[in-house]
Image (cartoon, helix red, strand yellow):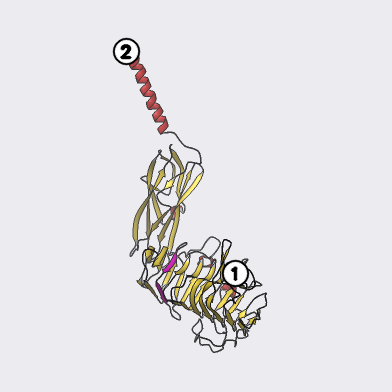
Amino acid sequence: MKTFLKIVLLFIGISSLLVLSNCKKTQLLTNNSAKLEFSADTVLFDTVFTTIGSTTKYFKIYNNNSGKLIISDIWLASGTQSQFRINVDGSPGVSFNEVEIEANDSIFVFVEVTVDPNNSNNPLVVEDSILFLTNGNEQRVLLNAWGQDAYFHVNEIVQGTWANDKPHVIYGIAAVGYPGLDSNLTLTIPAGTKVHGHNNARLFVYKSSLLVNGSVGNPVEFSQDRTADYLLYPADSVAGQWRGIHFIEALTSSIDYAEIKNAVIGIQIDTAGNGTTVNLNSVKIDNSLFAGILTQGANVTAVNCLFGNSAQYSAVISIGGSVNFDHCTFGNYWSSTRNSGLFTFSDYYESGSTIQHRPFTSANFSNSIIYGNNDNEFVLDTLPRNSSWSIAGSAPVFNFANCLIKTDTTIADANFFSNCIINSDPLFVNPYGWDYHVPMNSPAVGQAAGSTSGNDLDGNGRFGNTIGCYEYQ
């Protein structure tokens, strides 16, 4: 009898342990601190399609918690209108409810897209997202596919000559040389090429050469990859949709007849290589989020260039190098408030409590316009010669000749300014609409001298000696 009782008690004990174990395994987590994790936050379809195409990718949803999670809702944001199709844990559809994932387990989500890349009416990029609602937490995975046939550069080293028969799309970084990987490369981009950057994408040039060979009437165009309008704004009106072109210690490079728009910084040039120069000829930069051009210790020659509207600066020319700008227009009529002048020139920077003086070898600005809708558009931030910061009383290095400048300070020193026009409205045709042409009665007409420019930004001859990037209309 005692033996039987022991067996019964042992059986009850084992059963209880199994029940407790089962309970522990199926414990449901309802606290909003328990979230999902994903194997990817973006599903990118970067395949180059050549006909009506379909491809499938997948990602995993992880429950890395100690208890079971129930995903209340999973849905495709665009629903049945989406060009994407999804399958969650073996079930196809556009929305799913009460999807369970056990503790420390995962499930698959398959994503398929069908686009016709040869349909010119498609947007360049097709976007959607899958949303997940778990314990009040909303999470999402982005979906990106290319709606037109294009060349795709996804975090890769690039060189050689790009074809111009279809667009080039940069996702992440397209690098002409990269620290620790490669240098002394050359990328050539021929006339008529269209280059599109995804969010925060950049064309990066490191100890290498970039040759952009646009021509009059057939420029190379750099812009964002989104062509579909936003809810409240046209896609082409939103600044900062991609990072821009970035040079570091570049070998001699040139950008001829190019249009760069909607970047964070249109062109950034850092640290000149030994005896090398970045040459800009007939380059138009507009609608930048931070600056049209930013130089830091760079050697730059710019002729017939427009550095246009920006949320902050049209140009920041700083901390040394050799810079020469002739027949350029620095214009900024940003529609919202700007807290800075559009043009800033600086020959030092602060590192903690230390002042680092970086004088220019040369800095010449001739036949150029610096004008916008702020009261002061011209900031000279050079190291004072009569203070504890001075470097042996040395004078700053810069010269402005035959320029039209808007400023609220006196700039009469003949050592730095010659034949300049102060605070006369150049009468831009429509600067809020990015048109910086000037009429025949503009004070800029007839004021140019010693020009290095044979033609203006439109390719017209310099018949009227008009300062700025355009001859008068």
Q: Residue at label 1? A: 334
Say if 142 sits above or below 249 in the image: above
| Mark 1 closeness class: few <14, some 14–19, many ≥20 residues within 10 Å | many
222 or 253, nearer to the observer: 253
Instruction: Locate the C terminus and report the quarter of the image it occupies.
Output: bottom right
- Name the main secondary structure of what is drawn in magenta: strand
344 or 76, nearer to the observer: 344
> What amino acid does circle 1 point to?
Trp
Q: Residue at label 2? A: 3
Say if 84 sits above or below 437 in the image: above
Coordinates of residue 1 in the picture (x, y in percent): 33, 10
Q: Is residue 112 visible?
A: yes
Q: Is residue 16 left or right of residue 315?
A: left
Coordinates of residue 208 in the picture (x, y in percent): 39, 71
Magenta-drawn stretch contains 202: yes
- Secondary structure category for the residue under label 1: loop
Res. 383 image quadrant: bottom right
Coordinates of residue 221 in the picture (x, y in percent): 45, 73
